[in-house]
Amino acid sequence: MDADAIRAAYERQARTYDSLFGFVSRRARDEAIAAVNRLPGEAVLEVGVGTGLALPHYKAEKRITGIDLSQHMLAQARARVVALGLRHVEALLEMDAQATSFATGSFDIAVAMFVASVVPDPHALVRELRRVVKPGGTILFVNHFAREKGPVWWMERAMAPASSALGWHPDFRLGHIFTHADLAHAKIRTLRPLGLFRLVEIPN
Ligand SMILES: C[S@@+](CC[C@H](N)C(=O)[O-])C[C@H]1O[C@@H](n2cnc3c(N)ncnc32)[C@H](O)[C@@H]1O
């Protein structure tokens, strides 16, 4: 999916996102936020911030910068920040997570929740997050990663042609984004519900 297809998919979904996908993904998102909150460092970059569902749940001392390709999703996130008076959110910017304008080493932590299987070039996403996070910082991904075999794997493959309409790739595997070296140093946890999502934490 290219950037225009992503923008179009999330323009359609912006108003219904929270009650549909937002609900299904809530527990996994909560786990990722809890992991961010446990880590040292205050400067947090959330890429593909979407409607800002995570924003109210970061610890007050974290300083959050959120970016997204979709102005329609960002509009929902900005409305949430205003409605809830979220002072720890420093900026919400329209920007491509694969090529940001941030200086090298700007953040202590970067987190990508349900974004890795959406971006056109997941390797570029990892490279960019490694660049903008300081050495010693942490990069976290929470995502659906396809199984390697079994009935769920067949279902994921069957759904793959619908990826443009869905706005994500059901058959996306860990190997589509991470190198062997990344995985050798990563902490990976399978999350509820039903092991649909995995949290991957990579030291930078
Ligand atoms: C499935 S939604 C996840 C939203 C949010 N992270 C959450 O937890 O609900 C994927 C989001 O990633 C955004 N996105 C996709 N590709 C992107 C890119 N290259 N750069 C920035 N955001 C992107 C989409 O616009 C969409 O808002």
Image (cartoon, rainbow, N blue to C red):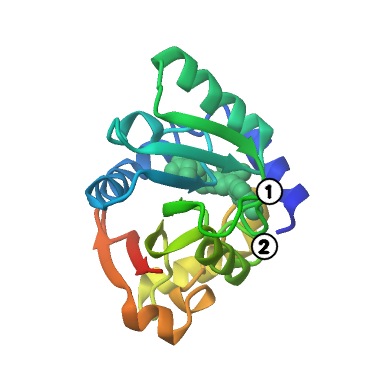
Residue 3 coordinates in the image, percent (x, y): 73, 52
Identify which residue is drawn at 37% across, 36% down: 23
> Mark 1 to mark 2: distance in Å?
9 Å
Q: Indicate the secondary structure of the residue bearing disc 2.
A: loop
In the rendered image, which quarter contains the N terminus?
bottom right
Q: Is mark 2 within 8 Å of ligand 1?
A: yes
Please tell me which of labels 1 and 2 falls first in the chain: 1
Residue at (42%, 85%) from the top-left corner?
181
Q: Residue at x 39, y 28 (%)?
A: 88
Nearer the observer, 36 or 70: 36
155 or 101: nearer the viewer: 101
Classify residue 21 as left or right of residue 10: left
Disc 1 beta carbon < 8 A from ligand 1? yes
Q: Which mark is residue 165?
A: none
Locate residue 76: give its quadrant.
top right
Q: Horizontal and vertical percent for residue 30?
A: 28, 43
Residue contact between numbered discs 1 and 2, judged by CB atoms under 8 Å = yes
Give the labeled residue for mark 1: 6
Identified at 31% across, 33% down, the residue is 57
Which residue matches tag 2?
120
Q: Amino acid at mark 1?
A: Ile
Q: Measured along the vertical axis of the image, is residue 13 above or below residue 127?
A: above
Q: Amino acid at mark 2?
A: Pro
Q: Which quarter of the rendered picture does the C terminus lie within?
A: bottom left
Look at the picture and state if 189 lies above or below 27: below
Q: Is residue 184 visible?
A: yes
State the image quarter where residue 78 is shown: top right
